Amino acid sequence: QVQLIESGGGLVQAGDSLRLSCAASGGTFSGYAMGWFRQAPGKEREFVAALSRAGGVTYYAGSVEGRFTISRDNAKNAVYLLMNSLKPEDTAVYYCAAASTVTVATTSGRYDLWGQGTQVTVSS
């Protein structure tokens, strides 16, 4: 079974960029659709971006489209989230997730594996 570990979070200023990484181990990574979700304090976890198994199909939340880019490297068993033009409202814990039963998914219920999360804080 795949295990997920996120990294790359931190404290940045508005307008800066960050790249989150999610390393997968213990399974056939290419067989999973991948996604990023985030949860801000006092709010529910929300969808950020999703990527199909082969990487050819992507979906983004409207709040990040045009600023964030999800990608994967199946040879390195990794998925990435490049975040540009960060805003204070992007502050949250970001979670990497893997879905084994669908080609691509935008809802958290479709994902069966989750990382522990990485904190992203954007100051104004």
Image: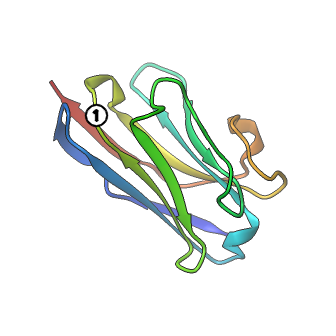
Where the N terminus falls, by quadrant? bottom right
Q: Which residue is drawn at 48% across and 36% down?
A: 38
Near-viewer residue (39 or 59) = 59
Q: In this view, does 42 lie to the left or right of 62?
A: left
Q: Residue at x 56, y 74 (%)?
A: 77
Residue 106: quadrant of the picture: top right
Q: In this view, does 99 lie to the left or right of 46?
A: right
Q: Give the percent coordinates (x, y) of residue 25.
A: 58, 75
Badge 1, how many Cα within 10 Å: few under 14, some, many 20+?
A: many
> Callout 1: helix, strand or loop?
loop
Query: Which residue has dot 1 on it?
Result: 86
Q: Give the percent coordinates (x, y) of residue 96.
A: 54, 51
| 89 versus 99 height, above or below | above
Residue at the outermost top position = 42
Q: What residue type is labelled 1?
A: Leu
Q: Give the percent coordinates (x, y) of residue 32.
A: 72, 62
Q: In this view, does 119 lie to the left or right of 3?
A: left
Where the C terminus falls, by quadrant? top left
The scheme the figure's colours follow is rainbow
Residue 104 appears anywhere in the view: yes
Q: Which residue is drawn at 48% across and 63% down?
A: 5
Residue 1 appears anywhere in the view: no
Near-viewer residue (110 or 1) = 110
Residue at the outermost right position = 101
Q: Give the percent coordinates (x, y) of residue 117.
A: 45, 49
Q: Which residue is drawn at 50% across and 46% down?
A: 95
| 25 versus 22 height, above or below | below
Near-viewer residue (113 or 61) = 61
